[in-house]
Every structure is written in C-alpha cells, then in structure tokens.
Amino acid sequence: MRVLQVASEATPFAKTGGLADVVGALPGALTRLGCTVTVALPAYREVFSARRLPVEPTGWEFDVPVGTQTKRATIHQSRIPGKDGAADATVYLVGNDSYFDRPTLYGGAEDYPDNAERFIFFSRAVLELANRFEQPCDIIHSHDWQTGLIPAYQKVLATQWPRLSKARTLHTIHNMAYQGVFWHWDMLLTGIDWRYFNWQQMEYFGQLNLLKTGIVFSDLVSTVSPTYAREIQSAPGGCSLEGVLSDRGDTLVGIVNGIDTDAWNPRTDPHLPRPYDATGVADGKAAAKAALAARLGQVAPDPRPLVAFVGRLAEQKGIGLIFDLLGRMAGSGRARFLILGTGDPRAEDGLRRMASAHPGTIDLVIGFDEGLAHLVQGAADMLLMPSLYEPCGLTQLYALRYGTIPIVRATGGLVDTVVDATDDALCSGTASGFVFDAVDGGALAHAVDRALALHADSDRWSGLVQQVMGQDWSWDSSARKYLRLYERAVAAAPQPVRLP
Ligand code: ADP
Ligand code: GLC
C-alpha cells in the first residue's frame, strides 16, 4: 500500500501540538506494517533552522496556480528513519519563501492574514508533486483544515492530476474547533468552481470552510478517538458541523492516537538526568525533580507531590478550571504545582499573577520547550488534563509511560485512555488515573484530593504507577486500524461528487 500523508506539521520538522507528534510517528508505524509512506509538509523556516534531520534540495520546482497568480513551489527532501528494519518514510517539504519563511507556523496572537492562501498553495502543490511520483499513491491521507482542500482537489480537478485519479482519500480531524474559516472571496484562490460554494459542500454561513471541505469530499473521514467521533456528531462537539458529520455516518471512524515509544521512553530519554523503568521509577523521579528544581533556580526539590500541567494555554485545555483549582488548593500546602505552557496572552498574565501570589508553591514556565516537557513528565507525580473537550490527547499517554498519574476530565479521548482509580479498578488492576465529569473547579479539586490521598498510601500508589507504566500505547495497534481503513477505502467506490 502506497500512502501519502499530508499535514501542516510533523515532528521533528515543525511542531505546535499533538498533530505533529501523530504525523511524525504514524509513518514509521505504517512502514513497519509494510506500507510505503511519503509525507508532505510545508518547508517552514523552522524546518531549516532547527536542522534536526538532514534536509536536501531535490531540484524539483514547478508553478502552482493560486487564483489568477502563479506561485513557484520548490521541493526539498528528508526522511523519517525506519525502525526495526522497516523502510524510511520519504518526506517532501514544499517551499515558497513568501509563504513559509516566517518566524512561526501560523502566526502569533493573531493568525497570519493570508493563511487561506498559504494552505491553498500548499494543498495544490502537494497534488502537483504527488502526480510526479514514480509510483502513484493508493491513499492520500490528509489532516485538519490546512489540508482539507486535498480531497476536493483530487475529485473536482481530477483531470489535472491523472496519476492520482485512482487514489482514495482519508481526512483525519484532530480538532473540530479549528475549521479554517475564511471570507468567501478566498474561494477564488482555490481555482474550484463557484458552484461548489454551497451549504452542502464548501460554504459555511457565507464563508469558505476548509475543514468542512475535507469532510465532505474525502472517501473516508476519521478522528482521533471513538468517543470524540461520537461527540462531534451532535452539538456542541461538532462545532456547527454536527449535521455534516452525522451525514458521513459509518464512513466516520475514531482511532485513538499512539505514542512514539522511542521519543517518549523514560528508559532512554536524554532529557532525564537518570533514565528509569518501572523498577527504578522512585529514584528516576527523584533525580528528575532535583534537575527540575535546579533548572527553575530552586535550592532544593520540594518533598510535596508535584502536580503538573503541560499544554497549550487555550480554553480547550480547561485553563479556567486550573485557575479555580489553584485558587482553592495553592494555600493548602499539600502539593506543589507546575505549569508549562504558552498560548492565550490573558491566560499567561493570569497565571503569572497566580504564581507570584504563591511563590514556592506554583511554578510557571511560559514558553514551548520540548526538553522541559520531557523533564516535567519525568519529575511530576500527577498530570492535570481538565480539558473541556479533548479529541484524543497525547500528554496523558506520555504521562502514563513516565509513571505520572493523569487527572483528567471525562471527555473525548481522555475517556478512551484513562480508567478512574475506583477501589474496584485499583483491585482489578485496570485503574490508570483520576477521572471527573463536571466542568467545575470543585470537581477537579475533588479528583486532585483523591489522587493526593492515594499518593499518601505509598504501596497502593506505587502499585498504580507500576500498573500504568506497563500499559502499551505504542502506535502498533492504531496503525493497524489505519491500515484496515485504507484497505476499506481502496476496496470501496469513491465518495461521489455531486453538485446539489
Ligand atoms: P494538543 O495537540 O491539543 O495541543 P496533545 O496532548 O495531543 O494536545 O499534544 C500536545 C503536544 O504538545 C505534546 O507533545 C506536548 O508535550 C506538547 N506541548 C504542548 N505545550 C507544550 C509546551 N509549552 N512546551 C513543550 N511541549 C508542549
Ligand atoms: C489535536 C487535539 C488533541 C490530539 C491531537 C493529535 O490537537 O487537540 O486532543 O491529541 O490533535 O491528534
């Protein structure tokens, strides 16, 4: 099976969140199952400046129509090395300096005003590129709004890319809250006939919606957990596209993300001062706590349990509940809190005020720091994830691998990956964290209370830690599910394109 993965980010080339982790790791898992995988990404400045893997020019250049203009695409190449004897995945980086040689991927506090144009260019360039591959691909697997045009282009402008006409398309939704909604005149930049700008296809309340476009035109649609697949078929989870999603019915599938067990491995993690496995977890965590304290300029590590949050400071992540929790618990002296994140400037300011009101109890690191995220997972005892909604979530899966017990709200992928530590679940060895339901700081505080109470019982706590560290969240089983989905798409007739 020849698979082309198309996305706006992938580790180790460019990352703002979990999408990058998925697109960075899934190709390797698919090559281990015998697929030939190619990945297409934008050639951002970060791809060249970070230089985590060698990136070479290919000499390929071609013109891409964007509205009435023509833009040049310059293609670079790299590889995601295969593991366990599997082949490498080829990575093509689609460049155009005016679009992608910028300080960040999508903009800062404000998105770049030409984001529609940037990803229209990218999507169309990827089809031009794939049409030049020696062997045509069987599956084009696109991700999120940035590549939502890919399934539409492959069908509506099929004659332009004859070597792609037999391919089937799968579009994966990582987050319904980001739909790529732009003013209607951007439709002209796509080169797709205006007749497709209708409420059943590309239009959304008078605007162009690129995620909706991907959902409507692709042969199969998936999202990143079974629970989220159900949630998005009704309000509010569907973010106004619940009708479009429920229309896709049994062609909408939920597959839980896996984790890259090499990048996130406490036994080999170069960011940990003393890498550890389940038997050495106490010493490993103590060493990580000492390193973290030193990194934060503290004289000695705090003996209290460390409760951490690592993530985007966005409403989605339950930042409001974290404020409420800190307000309730910071004065109690029962735990130390650490927040590592960046995002909403108001949340950043609020957290700064909260941290300075509780020195010695709340540590705050504003910024995006991959190495520190690993160290925090190693050092912390508990990880907070009180998300209002969570399509899958990777941070709780990393926590499980590092023996850090997640405290999560019962939503989306968190439901599918964390089992509440009731007495029964603890006895039967199925417990893996603390789960609460209500969107309420009191409910979160109660879950943290329960976690702290169990932590005080060191035998039971270490039993839970051993239990979660033994779980397997590697990509193997999820990649198999993707492969089955690809096989299903190839065996079925393509999703028909009709003008209403
Ligand atoms: P989302 O994709 O919604 O942001 P996930 O849990 O799926 O949430 O993935 C988040 C990824 O981004 C994880 O790899 C996490 O470690 C990383 N991450 C988020 N914020 C930061 C940060 N401030 N510094 C370092 N890594 C971060
Ligand atoms: C999104 C979601 C997150 C998911 C990630 C990767 O960013 O918010 O829940 O884990 O994509 O699929």
Image (cartoon, grey):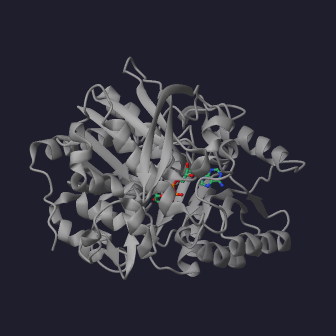
Q: Residue furthest top?
A: 85
x, y (%) of residue 466?
Answer: 50, 42
Residue 472, compared with residue 339, is above or below; it is above
- The residue lying toward the viewer, choosing from 150 and 229, is 150
x, y (%) of residue 384?
Answer: 58, 62
Q: Quadrant of the C terminus?
A: bottom left
Residue 393, compared with residue 208, is above or below; it is above
- The residue lying toward the viewer, choosing from 258 and 337, is 258
x, y (%) of residue 196?
Answer: 26, 69
Left of 264 or right of it: where is 139? left
Residue 476: which quarter of the image? top left
Residue 175: which quarter of the image? bottom left
Left of 235 or right of it: where is 68? right
Residue 194: which quarter of the image? bottom left
Residue 180, compared with residue 204, is above or below; it is above
Residue 41, compared with residue 79, is above or below; it is below
Q: Residue furthest front?
A: 68
Q: Residue at x 71, y 78 (%)?
A: 327
